[in-house]
């Protein structure tokens, strides 16, 4: 899952290179669509599958609803911050910052996948009984 976020970050980092109208700029605009969008879609599918695998059946609706609310709130806050940052420092630095944050999310995902989750330990203990 972390690799998917890294691919999305690299794809997003290509956007600032599209400076002038032309074939080169079109390629820099097209590449993130062809690389980043599928990576983000696959990441969303995997994260939903992981939540549904780890969560007890009775909690699935509450957990998925909570994550959906958090995702929508993050989009709203991110849009406001990006709009403010774009007007304060410019569009290209804002896109670079977004790419770095997506890459940072991939790093957090990578580090957290290396440590066993308490839920996984609990589930393995229950299965051993």
Image (cartoon, helix red, strand yellow):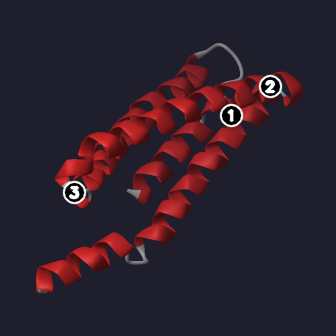
Q: Which residue is labeled 1 in the image? A: 95
Give left or right: position of 61 versus 5.
left
- The residue carrying pointer 3 sits among few (fewer than 14), some (14 to 19) or many (20 or more) residues within 10 Å by Cα, namely few
Q: Which residue is mark 3?
A: 56
Residue 110 horizontal/vertical position (percent) = 47, 66
- For disc 2, the marked residue is 84
Q: Is residue 29 above or below residue 119?
A: above
Q: Quadrant of the C terminus?
A: bottom left
- Residue located at (41% from left, 69% from top): 113
Query: Which of the two marks, 2 or 1, is nearer to us in this view?
Result: 2
* Callout 2 secondary element: helix
Q: Secondary structure at mark 3?
A: loop
Q: Earlier in the sequence, mark 2 or mark 3?
A: 3
| Residue nearer the viewer, 98 or 64 | 64
Q: Earlier in the sequence, mark 3 or mark 1?
A: 3
- Distance Cα–Cα, label 3 vs label 1: 38 Å
Residue at the spot 28% in from the left edge and 77% down from the top edge: 122
76 on left or right of 5 = right
Residue 94: percent from left, percent from top: 74, 33
Mark 3 or 1: in front is: 3
Dividing the picture into quadrants, the one containing residue 15 is: top right
Q: Measure the alpha-carbon separation of dots 2 and 1.
A: 12 Å
Q: Earlier in the sequence, mark 2 or mark 1?
A: 2
Of residue 30 and residue 44, the one placed in the foreground of this image is 44
Q: Is residue 67 above or below residue 80?
A: below
Q: Position of residue 61 (x, y in %)?
A: 27, 40
């Amino acid at each position: 899952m972390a690799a998917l976020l890294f691919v999305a970050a690299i794809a997003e980092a290509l956007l600032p290179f599209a400076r002038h109208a032309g074939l080169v700029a079109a390629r820099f605009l097209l590449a993130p669509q062809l690389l980043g969008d599928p990576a983000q879609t696959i990441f969303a599918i995997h994260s939903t599958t992981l939540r549904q695998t780890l969560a007890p059946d009775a909690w699935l609706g509450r957990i998925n609803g909570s994550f959906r609310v958090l995702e929508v709130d993050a989009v709203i806050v991110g849009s406001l911050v990006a709009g403010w940052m774009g007007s304060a420092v410019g569009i290209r630095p804002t896109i670079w910052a977004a790419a770095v944050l997506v890459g940072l999310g991939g790093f957090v995902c990578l580090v957290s996948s290396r440590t066993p989750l308490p839920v996984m330990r609990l589930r393995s203990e229950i299965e051993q009984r």
